[in-house]
Image (cartoon, rainbow, N blue to C red):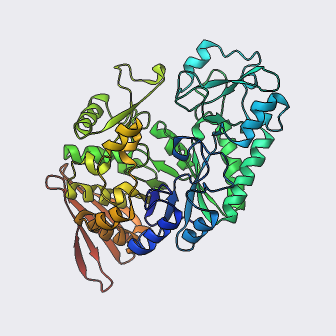
Amino acid sequence: MSIKNKVQLITYPDSLGGDLKTLNHVLMKYFPNVFQGGIHILPPFPSSGDRGFAPLTYLEIEPQFGTWDDIKQISAKHDILLDLMVNHISAKSEYFKDFIKHGRKSKYADLFITVDKIWADGKPPKEDIEKIFLRRTEPFSDITIEDTGKSEKVWTTFGKVTPSEQIDIDIKSEITKKLITDFMINFNKNNVKIVRLDAIGYVVKKPGTTCFMIEPEIHEFLDWITDLAKSLNIELLPEVHSHYTTQFMLADKGHWVYDFILPYTILETLLNKNSERLQKYLKIRPHKQFTMLDCHDGIPIMPDLNDLVSTKDAQKVVDICLDRGANLSRIFSPNHKYPDGFDIHQIRCSYYSMLNCNDDAYIASRAIQFFAPGIPQVYYVGLLAGKNDEENVNKTGEGREINRHNFSIQEIAQDIKQEVVQRLLKLIKFRNEYPAFNGDFIILDSPSNALKLKWEKDDKICTLIINLDSYKSTIEFVNNNGAKEELKL
């Protein structure tokens, strides 16, 4: 299949009405023909933590969300994108529970990474651990095997607690390859068209390295899973937070990638009323990308923007966002922070709140996103111009909940009436339907307080003009009669 060059929605299975059946109802009633690019449903599988990102299996749907039939119902009108956490699986999965019981005698033993697979003596040197791009104090958990009472140290990249809920899997083992194959076959059977490879950067473990995006092994794995996906008519989207050159390298090899640079760069452009950095970036970025402004995590800063933005400039943007209610995710590894101490991994905040709930600025941000080459994704909170959910942060103690509000049917019915949401829907309609977006992209010369982006294909031409002083956005385009027309956003 080929991915449709139209707007996609990102949502949790329960965030627009409470479950998958209601999500389908919401899409048909409130957003018919809006998300022609597809729906990215964040993990709807049984999970033991991290809001779905610690899956027990991919063969089932969490009963409180619905069933595979509900996914198929949505897929009747929308291409479905689901996540595959290729780096880990839940500690509560049948696979790891069997390992806890039987240890090395478990039929699933080779699915996991005991440290002696990486260091023969089972003792990782301190200098090796210091090189790893850490997400926790050390990337291991100690497990006591029930049958023997013996302790096993297994690799666990992620997790706030010890032992971790997310157990890394060994992509080199045959049992892992068979399991991934089974999961992918099941996706195909249930009409899944696109699979996001979550946390793929961490899958290769190699002594003396960062254990992140390690070459050539990462490409060998990507080649293997790409061949598998192609045989099942599934497109893949590797998800990698890394130095921007990593994304460029993956795009050069023909992979779809995420544009994790764009959210910050658009935000900075609007806050500073200066498009110089954005114009430079648009000239060098790959076109085969998915674009986003907001998501279930935050606005990427490090390591995605390393060497593109100075820490001084980034700190100014961070401070404005903090004033507007944001909270921060920080880089954990001491060796991967900036020498000046700057360590911001992501800014967590609703995009609408970061722009001070200014409707014109928000519509300008979406217009830039939609005109940047790539497949635009709109996160469900951004779709409804949602504000920071500080109450949920205080209730859960999880900073990311600031941008994870669950909307009831009543809230959706009310919030869709907002003028800013109606303006966004009008913009989505234009992006979906105007033919020039399948043509050539041109960045027109403009002063730093403006931005002009153009698409042309045959006799169809459209130009986005943004005045950064006023945040007013206009699209000039040639209509079906060959006449010039203006769409004021």
Please provide percent x and percent y for residue 356. 21, 48
In the image as oriented, which residue stretches furthest toward the bottom? 481
State the residue in front, 53 or 480: 53
Asked if residue 186 is positioned above or below residue 178 in the image, the reply reads below
Quarter of the image with the N terminus is bottom right
- Report the residue at 34% width, 20% height from top: 340
State the residue in front, 480 or 358: 358
Residue 408 in the figure: left or right of residue 426: right
Please provide percent x and percent y for residue 25. 47, 71
Quarter of the image with the C terminus is bottom left
In the image as oriented, which residue stretches furthest toward the right? 105
Q: Is residue 220 visible?
A: yes
- Report the residue at 43% width, 62% height from top: 17
In the image as oriented, which residue stretches furthest toward the left? 470
Asked if residue 476 is positioned above or below residue 148 in the image, the reply reads below
In the image as oriented, which residue stretches furthest toward the top? 126
State the residue in front, 457 or 474: 474
Res 101 quadrant in image: top right
Please provide percent x and percent y for residue 357. 22, 52
Q: Is residue 275 visible?
A: no
